[in-house]
Image (cartoon, grey):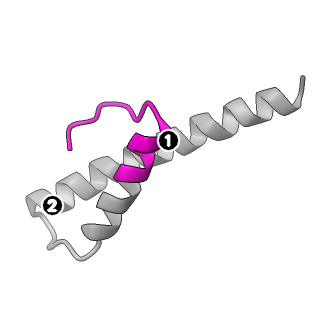
């Protein structure tokens, strides 16, 4: 998976499923690195989604 940014809910769903599939990755493995990157992308997407939702509700 080579996303720099999750741009849609489809990409987000794929990233979450992939993260779940990697949950038992060995430390310091390529899979563990991918897991860390996915977690950061998911966190960023959720933060942006929450921010947009909050902005819409305040209008």
**Magenta stretch bounds:** 1-14
Number of numbered tags placed on the structure image: 2
Q: Which residue is at a point 29% across and 54% down the rendered structure image?
A: 36
Query: 35 above or below 54?
Result: below
Work out whether residue 21 or residue 29 is closer to the camera in this orientation and state it: 21
Distance of mark 2 from mark 1, alpha carbons? 23 Å
**Among numbered discs 2 and 1, the one appearing first in the sequence:** 1
Q: In which quarter of the image is the N terminus?
A: top left
- Residue found at the very far left of the displayed protein: 29
Residue 10 in the magenta stretch? The answer is yes
Q: Which residue is at a point 78% across and 27% down the rendered structure image?
A: 55
Circle number at residue 32: none
Q: In which quarter of the image is the C terminus?
A: top right
Residue 40 in the magenta stretch? The answer is no
Query: 18 above or below 3?
Result: below
Query: 50 above or below 25?
Result: above
- Residue found at the very far top of the displayed protein: 59
Q: How crowded is mark 1: few (under 14 residues within 10 Å), some or many (20 or more)?
A: few
Work out whether residue 8 or residue 37 is closer to the camera in this orientation and state it: 8
Question: Mark 2 sits on what residue?
Answer: 31
Q: Residues within 10 Å of mark 2 (few under 14, many from 20)?
A: some
Circle number at residue 9: 1
Query: 15 above or below 45?
Result: below
Q: Which residue is at a point 27% across and 58% down the rendered structure image?
A: 35
**Which one is closest to the eye, mark 2 or mark 1?**
1
- Quadrant in the picture for residue 4: top left
The secondary element bearing badge 2 is classed as: helix
Q: Is 12 on the left-hand or right-hand side of 55?
A: left
């Amino acid at each position: 998976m080579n996303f720099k940014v999750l741009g849609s809910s489809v990409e987000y769903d794929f990233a979450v499923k992939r993260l779940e599939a990697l949950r038992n990755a060995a430390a310091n493995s390529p899979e563990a690195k991918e897991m860390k990157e996915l977690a950061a992308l998911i966190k960023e997407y959720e933060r942006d989604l929450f921010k947009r939702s909050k902005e819409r509700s305040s209008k």
